[in-house]
Image (cartoon, rainbow, N blue to C red):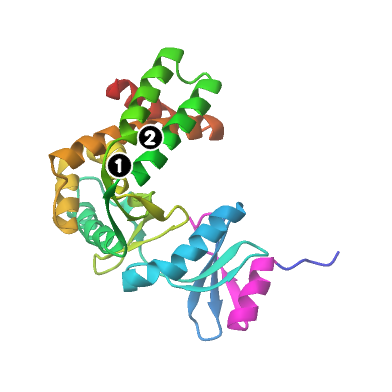
């Protein structure tokens, strides 16, 4: 039987010349580490969904360069295999840092400064355009949750009322990461934070980029919240904090539905618990 070469390797060799795969324990299956003849490491990220591939490739062209050394660089993109060839950045996932440690706190501070840099790439004046979009997303997630019998008819009515209120709320927009949390932060040896995974990046409500941290990570760890906003430059004001709390609805529905569909019981439980806390 003739062995078939991994198409990601074929793609990489067209760009870099001779390369070899490198075994890295703990590296997710959608990532492949490579080394070239000059002993330079690269990573290939392969997408299942072509839309996510296009969105992340666009982000690496239009947005990520503004972050300079705070994110990987895209060397090439291959629509055939839906793969991105990226520079390799060494470091430790911030999700694996010892809880309560100074390194965890410092990572949040650095991540706050990096997010500020991302938000400054494009900042849209307050208006209703993004509000209407997010209201529609809330209705869509509520519909999916109801069809899956994850929420009651009464809860759906409450969520739709929240969506109606969201639609007429003025909010400013920015280029957002939209999955900004420790699992996507890579801590370097000097304590700096590099940001990974830009497949969701797009124009959205600026405050929404804090929602995953607020509702998944900061509730039991307010000191991390303080460190993050020290790095970001300022905390949310009273109006922005109210909006951040309301974005918990989208966070809850997303976690509830995606957890249910993927069989991730922990994620689904987080969504259910957050929804109960909000209402």
Q: Residue at x 32, y 20 (%)?
A: 276
Q: Secondary structure at mark 1?
A: helix
163 in magenta: no
Q: Mark 2 = which residue? A: 250
Q: Residue 72, located in which quarter of the rendered image?
A: bottom left
Q: Earlier in the sequence, mark 1 or mark 2?
A: 1
Q: For the residue carrying disc 2, how many other residues have a C-alpha within 10 Å: few (<14), some (14-19), or many (20+)?
A: many
Q: For the residue carrying disc 1, how many other residues have a C-alpha within 10 Å: few (<14), some (14-19), or many (20+)?
A: many
Q: Mark 1 = which residue? A: 211
Q: Is residue 269 left or right of residue 215?
A: right
Instruction: Identify the residue at the far bottom of this view.
Output: 38
Which of 43 and 161 lies nearest the eye of the viewer? 161
Which of 34 and 241 lies nearest the eye of the viewer? 241
Q: Residue at x 32, y 33 (%)?
A: 166
Q: Secondary structure at mark 2?
A: helix
Q: Residue at x 29, y 36 (%)?
A: 215
User: Marks 2 and 1: in contact by CB < 8 Å?
Assistant: yes
């Amino acid at each position: 039987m003739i062995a078939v070469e991994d198409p990601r390797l074929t793609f990489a060799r067209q760009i870099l010349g001779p390369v070899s795969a490198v075994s890295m324990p703990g590296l997710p299956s959608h990532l492949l580490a490579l080394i070239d003849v000059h002993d330079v490491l690269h990573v290939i990220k392969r997408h299942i969904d072509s839309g996510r591939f296009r969105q992340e490739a666009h982000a690496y062209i239009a947005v990520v360069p503004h972050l300079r050394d705070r994110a990987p660089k895209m060397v090439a993109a291959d629509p055939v295999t839906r793969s991105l060839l990226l520079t390799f950045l060494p470091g430790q996932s911030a999700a694996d840092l010892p809880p309560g440690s100074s390194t965890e706190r410092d990572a949040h501070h650095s991540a706050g400064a990096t997010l500020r840099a991302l938000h400054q790439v494009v900042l849209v004046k307050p208006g209703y355009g993004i509000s209407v979009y997010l209201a529609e997303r809330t209705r869509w997630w509520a519909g999916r949750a109801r069809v899956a019998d994850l929420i009651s008819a009464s809860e759906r009515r409450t969520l739709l009322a929240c969506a109606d209120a969201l639609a007429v709320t003025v909010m400013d927009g920015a280029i957002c990461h939209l999955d900004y949390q420790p699992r996507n932060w890579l801590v370097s040896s000097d304590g700096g934070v590099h940001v990974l995974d830009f497949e969701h990046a797009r124009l959205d409500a600026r405050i929404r980029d804090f929602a995953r941290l607020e509702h998944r990570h900061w509730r039991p760890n307010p000191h991390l919240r303080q460190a993050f906003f020290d790095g970001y430059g300022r905390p949310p004001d009273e109006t922005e904090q109210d909006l951040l709390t309301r974005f918990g609805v989208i966070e809850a529905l997303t976690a509830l539905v995606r957890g249910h569909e993927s069989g991730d019981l922990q994620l689904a439980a987080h969504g259910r618990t957050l929804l109960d806390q909000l209402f």
